[in-house]
Image (cartoon, helix red, strand yellow):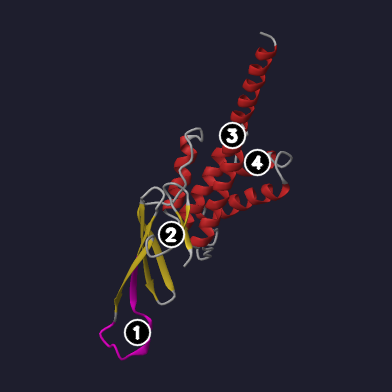
Amino acid sequence: MSSFTCPFCGKVVAKSASTYNSYRSTFYASNLHDKKEILNAQNVLLEFNNCPVCNFQNISATYMQGPKQNKVNIFPISLAKQFPEYVPFPIREDYEEAYSIKDLSPKASATLSRRCLQGMIRDFWNITKNNLYEEISELKDKIPAKQWEVLNGIRSIGNIGAHMEKDINTIVDIDPNEAERLIRVIELLIEKWYVARHDEEVLYDEVIALSDEKKELKHP
């Protein structure tokens, strides 16, 4: 069996008889002898992931009909990471909301990821311009080239959800997996920018305090 990441403590847990259980309910059409109807049967899969580390349980439901699947989390309502409070609340709120609706409305999720990115650029980098395009342009010489390309990608994909095409009959779709990729980048940026900066400051303060302590021992 595979593994799952506990949304409560962040530990990766191997699926086994003691950590994973599932129940499937299937609804068939009235004509059970019709192979086509059987293939199009509606299935609901309930999955229970039990974390032996923190003893919390993650519950999800997946609706399936043929190749179509729609998975929703029942508890907790979102599997978003719980970032520390030194990450500004509006950024955490947009990130968590983007995560919670990625399956229900991928376009809206992508728009929230775009908004979250803009909030981080304005707060962490102290860059505020007329629009996100100009703000990302200001970052070009401050971050790795690949990362800068990704920021533009989030902006561009987020625009699909935020703005209708000039020809309203032109539909550019975003699926849940694509919306989740944007969320993963947001998570990575929070880790690289906010969490890394905080950890660096804490480590530096500890070493400076240790150095001062040793100096006092040398010169009582």
- Are dots 1 and 3 in contact, CB under 8 Å? no
Decide whether residue 86 is among the magenta residues.
Answer: no
Query: Which numbered tag is attached to residue 199?
Result: 3
Three-letter code, disc 4: Glu
Q: Nearer the viewer, residue 137 or 211?
A: 211
Could you tell me how far apart the alpha carbons at marks 1 and 3 are, in whole angstroms? Answer: 55 Å
Residue behind mark 4: 134
Q: Secondary structure at mark 3?
A: helix
Residue behind mark 1: 38
Q: Nearer the viewer, residue 81 or 69?
A: 81
Q: Residue at x 48, y 37 (%)?
A: 84
Q: Position of residue 219 (x, y in %)?
A: 69, 9
Counting residues from the start of the chain, the first of labels 1 and 3 encountered is 1
Of badges 3 and 4, nearer the viewer stands 3
Q: Secondary structure at mark 2?
A: loop
Could you tell me how far apart the alpha carbons at marks 4 and 2 are, in whole angstroms? Answer: 30 Å
